[in-house]
Image (spheres, grey):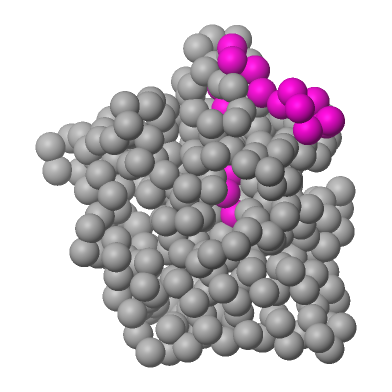
């Protein structure tokens, strides 16, 4: 089953979603009797970066083969989100800070009828998902669970070092310069080579435009500030079940920083007050999963882990 585009009009702005359910005319996506899994990409990535996870959920395949959904997991609708300025989603005015990104994702949740909701965020999408889950919980709106996939996390000191702050700023400005030099699409094609072939071109194209480059630059300006805000005022998930998946290959981070980030991910799971695997204080911790064959790009390298954890929350 392939993923299809699902354009929505929200507050007069076109929002592009990618998934395997619903209509494709921009008017009738969503089923109030079906569970909704909403996938939020990281900085500089679009909806198609979730391609392997979309395929896995469409085929209901976990790491040990097909997953039997005849039991508690019923009809499932899965949608990946192109944030404003990425892909076919219209740009948005105003700051692209953490609060704005969470509010934008919230408009998608409100626009898509569903039964239960699972939010999934990769990288910078992790804090976006945590922020939205807390906002929804505070409003008394149920969230069945959240999966954070190698997320940025304020518990890791590395995000507050001068090196990482400079890297965030440079990434945003570099994309604008690469676009002006007509090199951005080539670079993005190289970055998406690990995705299934059906998703590679769309994944590259969605972040290889001038609008996307400007959006990345604007989002990157707010990363350190957003994480500092989370340190001062952590979002309260009010018992929303939480799974944290941490890549274990060091890749560009090096072993020391990768271990520091994984320790932060493990602590994030332990601080969760929702039901989990009982590994944390009081036996009520969230669930921690190590992605041993992945670096940062877990949705590309081990999508089956993400699929399994989503289905576990719904089961």
x, y percentage for residue 299?
62, 52
Residue 268 relative to residue 43: left or right: left
Residue 225 position (above or below residue 286) = below
Quadrant holding the N terminus = top right
Q: Is residue 153 magenta?
A: no
Seen as rendered, the residue at the extreme left is 282
Dominant secondary-structure state across the stretch colored magenta: loop
x, y percentage for residue 46?
69, 56
Which stretch did the figure color magenta?
23-41
Residue 2 relative to residue 59: left or right: right
x, y percentage for residue 304?
61, 41
Depth check: 262 or 33 in front?
33
Which residue is at 42% across, 27% downward? 144
Which residue is at 42% across, 56% downward? 99
Q: Is residue 32 magenta?
A: yes
Q: Find residue 226 and report its image quarter.
A: bottom left
Residue 303 position (above or below residue 246) = above
């Amino acid at each position: 089953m392939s993923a299809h585009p699902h354009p929505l009009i929200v507050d007069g702005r076109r929002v592009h979603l990618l998934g395997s359910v619903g209509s494709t005319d921009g008017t009738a996506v969503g089923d109030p009797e079906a569970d909704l899994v909403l996938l939020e990409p990281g900085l500089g990535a679009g909806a198609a970066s979730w391609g392997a996870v979309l395929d896995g959920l469409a085929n209901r395949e976990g790491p040990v083969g097909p997953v039997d959904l005849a039991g508690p997991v019923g009809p499932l609708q899965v949608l990946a989100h192109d944030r404003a300025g990425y892909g076919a989603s219209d740009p948005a005015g105003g700051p692209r800070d953490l609060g704005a990104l969470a509010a934008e994702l919230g408009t998608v949740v409100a626009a898509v009828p569903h039964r239960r909701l699972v939010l999934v965020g990769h990288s910078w999408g992790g804090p976006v998902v945590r922020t939205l889950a807390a906002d929804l919980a505070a409003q008394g709106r149920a969230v069945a669970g959240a999966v954070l996939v190698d997320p940025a996390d304020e518990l890791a000191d590395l995000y507050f070092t001068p090196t990482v702050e400079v890297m965030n700023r440079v990434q945003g400005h570099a994309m604008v310069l690469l676009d002006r030099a007509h090199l951005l699409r080539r670079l993005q094609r190289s970055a998406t080579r690990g995705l299934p072939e059906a998703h590679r071109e769309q994944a590259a194209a969605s972040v290889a435009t001038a609008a996307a480059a400007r959006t990345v630059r604007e989002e990157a300006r707010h990363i350190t500030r957003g994480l500092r805000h989370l340190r001062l005022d952590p979002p309260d998930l009010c018992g929303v079940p939480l799974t944290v998946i941490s890549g274990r290959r060091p890749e560009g981070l090096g072993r020391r920083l990768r271990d520091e980030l994984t320790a932060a991910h493990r602590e994030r799971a332990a601080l969760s007050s929702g039901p989990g695997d009982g590994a944390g204080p009081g036996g009520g911790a969230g669930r921690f999963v190590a992605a041993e064959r992945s670096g940062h790009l877990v949705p590309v390298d081990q999508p089956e882990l993400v699929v399994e954890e989503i289905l576990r929350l719904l089961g």
